[in-house]
Amino acid sequence: GAVVSQHPSWVICKSGTSVKIECRSLDFQATTMFWYRQFPKQSLMLMATSNEGSKATYEQGVEKDKFLINHASLTLSTLTVTSAHPEDSSFYICSASTSGRTYEQYFGPGTRLTVT
Amino acid sequence: GQNIDQPTEMTATEGAIVQINCTYQTSGFNGLFWYQQHAGEAPTFLSYNVLDGLEEKGRFSSFLSRSKGYSYLLLKELQMKDSASYLCAVRDPGTASKLTFGTGTRLQVTL
């Protein structure tokens, strides 16, 4: 149980275009979802926290107008990278937690974004 | 602020025991997690400590001292598949399960 999926697993886009990444909890309802970014050989950096039906809370230094997060249902959150630039190339990972298991986050397999 | 430190890289021999340390200075604390991450993959949960002491789970054990802001992950009977990054993360008490990750330790297991 507690499976989280992400789609796509990898994507290549041209500079200036937008890319949407989906994060789904497959067998549980995720009251909270988290979006992380990870650059090569670095640790995970939290970008934002989203709760179903409310606006996401962004970490300091993360542009909310560039990284649009929508958490429309208890099983789906989306991250849209708008007007992508090469420096946005990274590994994006989502995780989900549920109110029933407050101490553990379940991570998705990640999405590798390359902006050319 | 949040400051979580780990050694950057470690090397150990197959069959041996290795200890990966994590020190933290955070504005709040509500538990410490250890995750394993293979290259290009998502982190997988290894252990969770919220009280002082040792938690054992098979070949993996994790220790916590809240007064010292210190934890370690102990891996026994190392196998080649244990070559991965190991991430220490502290949970924020202000939010249900917001995590701040440490710098991560890349472990290389050799023959």
Image (spheres, rainbow, N blue to C red):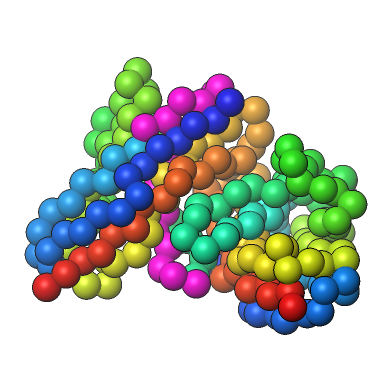
Judge from the rendering whether residue A11 lies leftward or rightward of residue B111; answer left or right: right
Judge from the rendering whether residue B81 lies leftward or rightward of residue A110; answer left or right: left
- Residue B11 image offset from top left, x and y in percent: 21, 59
Q: Where does the magenta region start and end?
A: B23-40
Q: Nearer the viewer, residue B53 or B70?
A: B70
* Residue at image point 70% right, 49% down: A47
Residue B66 position (above or below residue A112): above
* Residue at image point 42% right, 45% down: B88
Q: Do we see residue B46 in this rendering? A: no
Q: Quadrant of residue A23?
A: bottom right
Image quarter in which the C terminus of chain A is found: bottom right
Q: Nearer the viewer, residue B72 or A32?
A: B72
Residue B75 position (above or below residue A7): above
- Residue A74 image offset from top left, x and y in percent: 77, 58
Residue B107 position (above or below residue B97): below
Judge from the rendering whether residue B30 lies leftward or rightward of residue B7; answer left or right: right
Q: Do we see residue A55 in this rendering? A: yes
- Residue A104 image offset from top left, x and y in percent: 52, 48
Q: Nearer the viewer, residue A25 or A91?
A: A91
- Residue B101 image offset from top left, x and y in percent: 51, 44
Furthest toward the top, the residue is B67
Number of numbered discs visible in the structure rendering: 0
Q: Is residue B13 magenta?
A: no
Q: Quadrant of residue B70?
A: top left
* Residue at image point 78% right, 80% down: A13
Judge from the rendering whether residue A106 lies leftward or rightward of residue B65; answer left or right: right
Q: Is residue B27 magenta?
A: yes
* Residue at image point 29% right, 67% down: B83
